Amino acid sequence: MSERANPNVATRFFDRLGRTSVSAIEELGRYGTLLVESFYWLFLGYRVGQPVRIGAFFSEMMEIGVRAIAIVGMMAAAIGAMLAIQGIYSLKVFGAEGHVVFGVAFSMVREFAPLITGILVAGRSGSALSARIGTMQINQEIDALEVMGINPIRFLVVPSLLASLVMVPALTFMSMMIGLWAAGTYVNFALGMSLAAFMDQTISILSVDDLLHGLGKSAIFGILIALIGVVNGFMVKGGAEGVGKATTRSVVQCISAIVVTDMLFALVATL
Amino acid sequence: MSSNEQPMPPTVIEVRDLVTHYGTRQILNGIDVDIVQGEIMVIMGGSGSGKSTFLRHLMALQMPTSGVIKILDQDVWGLPQKGLFNLRKKLGVTFQAGALFSSMTVGENIMLPLYEHTKLDRLTMEIMARMKLEVVDLAGFEDLMPSELSGGMIKRAAVARAIIMDPRILFFDEPSAGLDPVVSSQLDDLILRLRDAMGMTICVVTHELESAFKIADRITVLDKGDILFIGTVEDLKNHPSERIQNLLNRRSEEAEIDADEYLRRLTGDKLEAEGMPR
């Protein structure tokens, strides 16, 4: 019996492994295709009478960016203050609390501001995008667009992708400023260093490269959030339950992609 | 030809040898259909007959495995992208659940094709949307959201959106589904009115016999991917084929299966394999 069962287990394992690998490659292909198609519609859509509507782009910028200002600002302030608190606490051991500005400035601008902004936008807008497109998919609204002669990628995806590409770096920049301000305020309270001195030191420490490092990867996060949200939305099957699953999957994939990309970016940038 | 005979209207949809597979499963087995201008063609069939797949092919939403579909003399799958967009402007579709965009008002839904395909100003688009809403008896509903409408109203709003560009061909996917008989009958009247007043060619997929008999000029009956019948309602009602009469009278072909056979089908070969008497 076991002699017969073992090959079946092995066969099943390799069968599942093969299927999972194929579907993962297929999904990667979808991301690639979607990105290429999005750029096609963005730059060449007008040639087939399907330009990207500026109104839709602004509406998405409002949704992805402007409506996220409050939460991103609050989180950035909390992270900035937390970095200052931890920095002063650890450096106190060496009697070097005054050097906390180095740690805070680099961490906030190069790592924490892009990361926290990316994660928050993924949770807010990546999931919303997935749910919206998933619901449209099951309600045949995507089919309706197609039969009306409206390309769904051009109509739904490009404005979101573009808005995400613009607004995630913009929010990241805001997050950097608020985080540094919160850290400076705490340093002023804990060490008596004035906010002006803190900012002056921060500016002298940071270079344009540091700023571009943070903003550059936040632009990549923006693209990842939009693509993952959209692909998961288009893959929805099976009604409301499918939409729920796609939304969860989208958030998990977005955050994982952001963290892994962040690590790779840091690795490449510091080589 | 006698002098009183009307000339045959031109064919607007021509389907030749349409074959569709889903994996190894064959859905359509070489369908040939012609739909002529100004007629209401109803496509009927039971579940799994291939009628929804057939409609998706006609709407150019799904590519068949093989075969040719010509709409308004244009080979749908041979058209370049721009050609397909232009062709779609001449088609209108009403989906089973309406497929109105839930984030837009009824008026915005109806104006969307105008906004995307024309350069009309907002006021003109609003006037046109109101006109179409009047055609479907929904005047004054343009500022409501789709979630505020009943099922029948959603379908009528979807019809208004489908006819906003004055299409030459209108497709309906299960227009009566989920509606009570009164509302369903009103929708049938609307379909007839659209054909008579606007001269549209209309293709309706339905499994509702009463509705089909009321609106159809001709009926195509599909069964397991084959065409069982194409012709007028009268011809269908009087057709001698037992298979067709079973479909019309909603009788299962296997309605008279015997009890032993039914038990064998449920238990498979397990009882026999275990030596138990059947």
Image: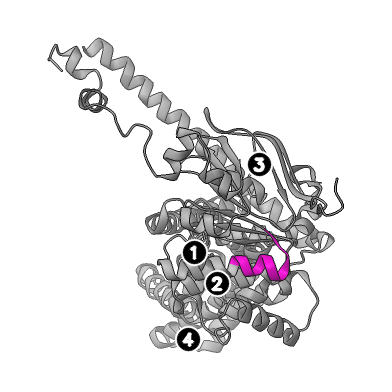
- Quarter of the image with the C terminus of chain B is top left
Q: Nearer the viewer, mark 3 or mark 1?
A: 3
Question: Is there any visible trace of residue A163 in the rendered image?
Answer: no
Q: Position of residue B275 (x, y in %)?
A: 14, 11
Query: Which residue in the protein does label 4 denote?
Result: A193
**Residue located 52% across and 62% down the image:** A136
Q: Is A104 included in the stretch rendered in magenta?
A: no
- Determine whether, in the image, residue B47 is placed left or right of residue B205: left
Inter-mark Cα distance, 4 to 2: 69 Å
Q: The residue under label 1 is which amino acid type? A: Ala
Inter-mark Cα distance, 3 to 1: 35 Å
Query: Which residue in the protein does label 3 denote?
Result: B63
Q: Dot 3 surroundings within 10 Å: few (below 14), some, or many (20 or more)?
A: some
Answer whether labels 4 and 1 touch (C-beta < 8 Å).
Answer: no
Which is nearer the N-term, disc 3 or disc 2?
A: 3
Which SS does the magenta portion mostly show?
A: helix
Q: Nearer the viewer, residue B234 or B267?
A: B234
Q: Which residues are magenta?
A: B191-201
Q: The residue under label 4 is which amino acid type? A: Met
Q: Position of residue B108 (x, y in %)?
A: 62, 78
Which is nearer the N-term, disc 4 or disc 1?
A: 1
Q: Nearer the viewer, mark 4 or mark 1?
A: 1
> Dividing the picture into quarters, in which one does residue B160 lie?
bottom right
Inter-mark Cα distance, 1 to 2: 38 Å
Same chain shared by disc 4 and disc 1: yes
Question: Tag 2's secondary structure?
Answer: helix
Question: Residue B156: which disc?
Answer: 2
Q: Dot 4 surroundings within 10 Å: few (below 14), some, or many (20 or more)?
A: some
| Protein chain holding label 3 | B
| Protein chain holding label 2 | B
Inter-mark Cα distance, 3 to 2: 29 Å
Inter-mark Cα distance, 4 to 1: 36 Å
